[in-house]
Amino acid sequence: MAVTDTHEEKETLAVDVLLPGHEPRATTALFERTKKQLIAREGGRCYVCGATAQESGQPLEAHHHPIERSLANMIDWPAVQAAARAGALGPHAAAFDWAAFDPADPYTFVDDMTVNGLLLCRQHHTGKDAGIHALPFPLWLAQKFGREGYQFTPGEVIHHAT
């Protein structure tokens, strides 16, 4: 078989990083309120496949993006602010009230899902061979732009609900 033919790629991903110390995971009121706003803004559809909660059979989930919550204490916030204001993190992060932001409380940005959130169905959030927490980013993102009907994994055929 030539590499130009469809072929299976199996990867074993081993990660060895030092996460900064942080408080135990808590669902904040800011997260809950802005998750509802994110769902409304995104029309209640998964960023990758466009499925609604009803279509996916699971509630939609808000993924912290681009800054993962557990990494907030290692982030160079002036660098994030500069990138956001320049538009590199998208229009919603650019519109965040950076003048009022205090890096001593990074969760005012991190837990605001309207500026740091990505709406995903469970499969594309934490699912095996499909979720952003399980795949290298280029493979995960390919699911959003893959051709309809493409056999992406042995268990997933690309399907866009919209």
Image: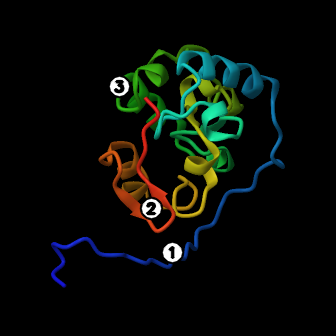
Residue 87, label in figure: 3
Which residue occupies 66% across, 44% down?
69
Determine which quarter of the picture holds residue 29.
Answer: top right
Residue type at numbered disc 1: Leu
What type is the residue that disc 3 sits on? Gly
Question: Label 2 amino acid?
Answer: Pro
| Residue 48: percent from left, percent from top | 46, 40
Residue 127: horizontal and vertical position, in percent?
61, 56
Marks 2, 3: nearer the viewer: 2
As helix, strand or loop, the secondary structure at mark 3 comes to loop
In percent of width and height, residue 31 lies at 73, 28
Q: What residue is pinned by disc 2?
A: 136
Cβ–Cβ under 8 Å for marks 2 and 1: yes
- Which of the two discs, 2 and 1, labels the residue nearer the N terminus? 1
Residue denoted by label 1: 13
Within 10 angstroms of label 3, few (less than 14), some, or many (20 or more) residues?
Answer: some
Q: Nearer the viewer, mark 3 or mark 1?
A: 1
